[in-house]
Image (cartoon, rainbow, N blue to C red):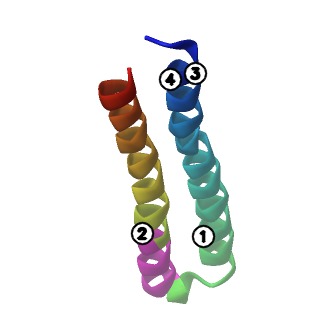
Amino acid sequence: MSTLVAIGAAIAVITGVGAGVGIGIATKGAVEAIARQPEAESKISKSLLLGAALAEATAIYGFVIALIIILFLG
């Protein structure tokens, strides 16, 4: 496998780090918001889950791109 292919795959997988950091920050904000307004917990939880799902989808796309790079270019 070429070195450039390995580097490209590694860069594509790094999207998982961004998604993890984003989900952590969103969770922190949701917990703080629920602590301030417990009656709004259901609305906050729904928004948090939607945002976490979208962020996780970004990480999955990066993983798929890394697999494509390895399988078809490697």
The residue pinned by badge 4 equals: 5
Residue at screen point 34% across, 32% down: 67
Tag 1 secondary structure: helix
Q: What span is colored magenta in the figure?
A: 41-50
Q: Sequence-wise, which precedes: disc 2 or disc 3?
A: 3
Give the Cα distance between marks 3 and 1. 40 Å
Q: Quadrant of residue 29?
A: bottom right
Residue at screen point 56% across, 13% down: 3
Tag 4 secondary structure: helix
Give the Cα distance between marks 4 and 1. 39 Å
Q: In the rendering, at what x and y percent does residue 72 appear?
A: 31, 30
Q: In the rendering, at what x and y percent does residue 36 appear?
A: 69, 79
Residue at screen point 50% across, 13% down: 2
Q: Left or right of 23: which side holds 56?
A: left
The kind of secondary structure the magenta stretch mainly shows is helix
Q: Residue 49 bears which disc, if any?
A: 2
Dot 4: within a 10 Å radius of its alpha carbon, few (fewer than 14), some, or many (20 or more) residues?
Answer: some
The residue pinned by badge 1 equals: 30
Q: Quadrant of residue 28?
A: bottom right
Q: Residue 68 bears which disc, if any?
A: none
Instruction: Using the image as rendered, state which of residue 68 and residue 27 is in the foreground.
Output: 68
Asked if the residues shown at circle 1 and circle 2 are in contact, with their CB atoms under 8 angstroms apart, the answer is no
Residue at screen point 42% across, 35% down: 66
Q: Nearer the viewer, mark 4 or mark 1?
A: 4
